[in-house]
């Protein structure tokens, strides 16, 4: 079994330093984060949905962390306080109010804070009311931009999740056959991922339905001739993998299915050729779209990919609705596809890559075979 991986407190301090640079540019006295992924990103420790920790970074560089029930010794924080998340083992429903009250005590004279960054997407009034005289600044965009650059400790957690998908696909190839139920496949793949990660998962991915483009597993048995698209996204300690493989249920893909498969695999090679820091994602999308339009069967109309990390869809977006550029340090999921009734729905193949100074590094080197 693999050992437990954690974010490195020293690298959390580096991430805090990057945020401090953004704070100085925006003239912020402090940033308060309540989203679990941002608390983890800056302090190194993650709590699940049952709890309401809060963290604050002051312009002085001082990091405050309010934890549920007991301090976390490994957290990258200068002051750690706790709030009561449970009373006699019963979870409180007013945890956000409780943790925020403790944060207010840490600040002391909160009225002196004049400009503060908060996540407009998730910050509750409990927090904003602490600073009655402050101008609020939406820090979401800055935090999301910072999260694109994956540090070594983040890459290790991501790779653990990605490697788990390799184990899941191996399990799938051993058991997928006509007559197997989608629920059987789902259950076996979840067990394989848990075993590979050595603990419960943060997430499990979304597509486990056979003969359709995607969806949750159904109480249904697979049929010969169908293609089974598995889009797997186990998350290890908050960091999400996201890659896909397509498997012929009877092990004998048709000529049309094989021709489409070759076309989709060639699309991945286009991305590998073009992907580098500074590359415009729209340009990559356009070139792949032109190639897939020449396929002998099937069509494509979805996105080409996206970043992954503490959320399953992050920047950069390989999608014409955004105008992103690839940046060194990005980790991306690339998923060309072709769909048509004559393909028994169709296929999607998705790889994970890290954007390096010289190009793309493949993180999911598992078999692409049908």
Image (tube, rainbow, N blue to C red):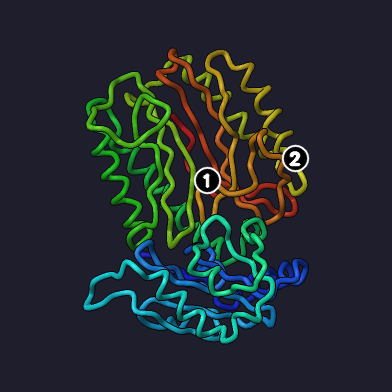
The image shows residue 211, relative to residue 331, as above or below, that is above
State the image quarter where residue 69 is shown.
bottom left
Percent across and percent down for residue 100 are: 47, 74
Location of the N terminus by quadrant is bottom left
Comparing labels 1 and 2, the label whose residue is closer to the camera? 2
Asked if residue 291 lies left or right of residue 87, the reply is right
Return the disc, 1 or 2, that comes first in the chain's sequence: 2
Neighbour tally class for label 2: few under 14, some 14-19, many 20 plus, Cα within 10 Å: some
**Label 2 element class:** loop
Neighbour tally class for label 1: few under 14, some 14-19, many 20 plus, Cα within 10 Å: few
Residue drawn at point x = 34 percent, y = 64 percent: 50
Viewer-proximal residue among 240 and 115:
115
Spatial separation of the CA atoms under disc 1 and disc 2 = 25 Å
Residue drawn at point x = 56 percent, y = 43 percent: 333
Looking at the image, which residue sits at the far front? 132
Circles 1, 2 touching at the beta carbon (< 8 Å): no
Percent across and percent down for residue 232 are: 42, 43
Viewer-proximal residue among 231 and 55:
55
Which residue is under mark 1?
Answer: 365
Viewer-proximal residue among 187 and 202:
202
**Label 1 element class:** loop
The image shows residue 132, relative to residue 315, as above or below, that is below
State the image quarter where residue 10 is shown.
bottom right
Percent across and percent down for residue 297 are: 53, 14
Asked if residue 86 lies left or right of residue 14, the reply is left
Which residue is under mark 2?
Answer: 280
Asked if residue 324 lies left or right of residue 37, the reply is right
Location of the C terminus by quadrant is top left
Residue drawn at point x = 33 percent, y = 63 percent: 199
Viewer-proximal residue among 16 and 272:
16
Asked if residue 81 lies left or right of residue 317, the reply is left
């Amino acid at each position: 079994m693999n050992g437990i991986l954690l974010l490195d407190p020293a690298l959390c301090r580096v991430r805090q330093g990057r945020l401090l640079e953004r704070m100085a540019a925006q003239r912020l006295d402090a940033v308060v984060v309540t989203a679990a992924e941002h608390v983890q990103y800056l302090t190194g420790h993650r709590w699940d949905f049952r709890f309401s920790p809060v963290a604050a970074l002051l312009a002085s560089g001082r990091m405050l962390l309010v934890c549920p029930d007991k301090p976390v010794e490994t957290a990258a924080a200068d002051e750690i306080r706790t709030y009561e998340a449970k009373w006699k083992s019963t979870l409180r429903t007013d945890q956000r109010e409780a943790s925020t009250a403790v944060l207010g005590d840490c600040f002391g004279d909160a009225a002196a804070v004049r400009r503060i960054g908060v996540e407009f997407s998730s910050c509750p009034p409990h927090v904003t009311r602490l600073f009655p005289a402050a101008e609020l600044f939406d820090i979401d965009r800055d935090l999301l931009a910072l999260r694109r650059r994956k540090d070594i400790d983040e890459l290790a957690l991501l790779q653990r999740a990605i490697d788990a998908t390799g184990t899941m696909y191996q399990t799938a190839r051993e058991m997928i056959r006509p007559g197997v139920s989608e629920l059987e496949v789902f259950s076996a793949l979840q067990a394989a991922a848990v075993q590979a990660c050595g603990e419960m998962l943060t997430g499990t991915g979304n597509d486990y339905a056979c003969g359709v483009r995607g969806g949750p597993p159904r109480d249904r048995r697979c049929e010969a001739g169908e293609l089974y698209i598995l889009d797997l996204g186990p998350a290890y300690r908050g960091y999400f993998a996201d890659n896909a493989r397509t498997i012929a249920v009877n092990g004998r893909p048709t000529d049309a299915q094989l021709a489409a498969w070759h076309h989709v695999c060639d699309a991945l090679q286009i991305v590998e050729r073009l992907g580098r820091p500074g590359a415009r994602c729209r340009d990559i999308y356009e070139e792949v779209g032109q190639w897939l339009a020449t396929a002998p069967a099937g069509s494509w109309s979805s996105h080409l990919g996206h970043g992954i990390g503490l959320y399953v869809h992050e920047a950069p977006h390989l999608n014409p609705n955004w105008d992103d550029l690839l940046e060194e340090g990005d980790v991306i999921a690339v998923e060309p596809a072709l769909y048509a009734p004559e393909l028994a729905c169709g296929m999607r193949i998705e790889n994970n890559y890290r954007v390096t100074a010289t190009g793309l590094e493949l993180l999911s080197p598992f078999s692409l075979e049908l």
